[in-house]
Amino acid sequence: MKASIITIGNEILKGKTINTNFAYIGNALTNAGYDVWRGIIVRDIADEIGFALKTALDSSDLIVTSGGLGPTYDDMTLASVARALGMNITLNEDALEMIKAKYKDLNIPITDQRRKMAMLPEGSYPLPNPVGTAPGVFINYKNKMIVCLPGVPSEMKGILDLTIDKLKSPGKSYVEKTVRLQGIMESAIAPLIEEEMKLWGNRVYIKSHPGSIEVSNPYIDIEVSSHLDSREEAEKDVDSVLNEIMAKYKSYIGK
Amino acid sequence: MKASIITIGNEILKGKTINTNFAYIGNALTNAGYDVWRGIIVRDIADEIGFALKTALDSSDLIVTSGGLGPTYDDMTLASVARALGMNITLNEDALEMIKAKYKDLNIPITDQRRKMAMLPEGSYPLPNPVGTAPGVFINYKNKMIVCLPGVPSEMKGILDLTIDKLKSPGKSYVEKTVRLQGIMESAIAPLIEEEMKLWGNRVYIKSHPGSIEVSNPYIDIEVSSHLDSREEAEKDVDSVLNEIMAKYKSYIGK
């Protein structure tokens, strides 16, 4: 099954913030058996969030968003998602209880801005936030899943870690292994990779990551991965390809 | 003028690599006067690269891509971009000279894989790569600009730094300043931000970045930015808003 990741926030587009959330979510979804298919980064603008969601729904079974769940005027993810899907947004009592519990210990009243974090698309479920105040949100939409997470990394991770087991893609196993070849240029190993890819068709994927500059002291990480129903088969295929590469380039390993 | 950034590479989607290139490009384009509008991250698949390019062209005047310029079979950015734009791909003599010069010092022959890095969309220009082998590429398409950069960060930066002056958005100045308020919750300052935004309309943009967890020891960075024709006016507006915020929240500054 395919997944897309949407990041909402001008600070990401302007390069003020490095998008570590994207990598965390991408890694979690890959390990949960998804092909992470596309990423879309948009501004804090309702139409842009709607555009991103519709684009992601075109290709993917699971969409995970991060950003825009907080209390300020430009936290508009839930209202924008609801509008794009033609859903109403209503006060979710479970979400409100979660938020009240957070502020209660501090004797802080629930203002309109704080209550806003409990306004969820109708029929959706709040996901507990073990770290901050705004709950995550789970939406079922035409047999697709949409998960909305906050942008603050610790909160995003806290919610996703508690939720990921429920999102597992049924029956797909992902196996990935890497070997480093030292003192060889990417352009020199390109023909071998092409040959192996032709041989293995769509059972394995081989990708080279040049780790330094091509012409001076080069090294390459050759990553071999497989996404099959059976973890055993995926592992067997990956190991076979790695062994072939290592046999051919023995003298470049661990130099 | 608007810009979009496209990142090409499965390793980004899988969360194996944190997308630092995106932040570097976003920051450079913002400082060059662009509104960075959308980001799209796609797989090393020709159709996906074409999809990303067409989506970016819908909204933006400048598109910058990174990734997929190297010598391996899955480096397919230039061929995919050409196909999406209905251009032919041909051997660019200037690009070939640049590549030959890189390998010449090392007495390394030009193989098919190395020559591939000089196959450019017809009518485009190679951009010198001061660090590695694959040149960047500049394409003029229906009064829009497309710049293709490699994925290796040092090479991407090397080419972009040499090119950015030619990409400047005419007549727009970007000013951004930030003040940190300590010991206050984002939900407490939300009404003020909303009020200021209503007051200043589209001359300034105010965004709050909660720097820790809402309920325990919170702080917020209030970022005020402006994108106007005149740098002086942008600076004046930003300072006015900052001064109002600082006057109102004096006791939370530098606590």
Image (tube, coloured by chain):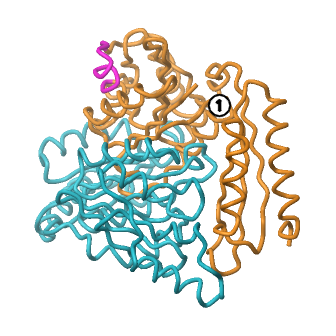
Chain colours: A orange, B cyan
Seen as rendered, the residue at the extreme bottom is B105
Chain letter behind tag 1 = A
Residue B240 image point, x, y percent: 17, 60
Identify the residue position indicated by label 1 in the image: A161
Q: Bounds of the magenta span? A: A79-88
Asked where in the image residue A214 lies, by quadrant, the reply is bottom right
Q: Residue at x 46, y 78 (%)?
A: B96
Q: Quadrant of the N terminus of chain A?
A: top right
Secondary structure mostly taken by the magenta-highlighted segment of the chain: helix
Residue B41 image point, x, y percent: 46, 46
Q: How many residues crowd mark 1 within 10 Å: few (<14), some (14–19), many (20+)? A: few
Q: Quadrant of the C terminus of chain A?
A: bottom right
Asked where in the image residue A169 lies, by quadrant, the reply is top right
User: In the visual, does B228 lie left or right of A81?
Assistant: left
Q: Residue at x 48, y 17 (%)?
A: A144
Element on which disc 1 rests: helix
Q: Can residue A147 be seen here?
A: yes
Is residue B178 or residue B82 the one in the foreground? B82
Question: Against B201, is A134 above or below?
Answer: above
**Magenta span contains residue A86:** yes
Residue type indicated by callout 1:
Asp
**Magenta span contains residue B222:** no
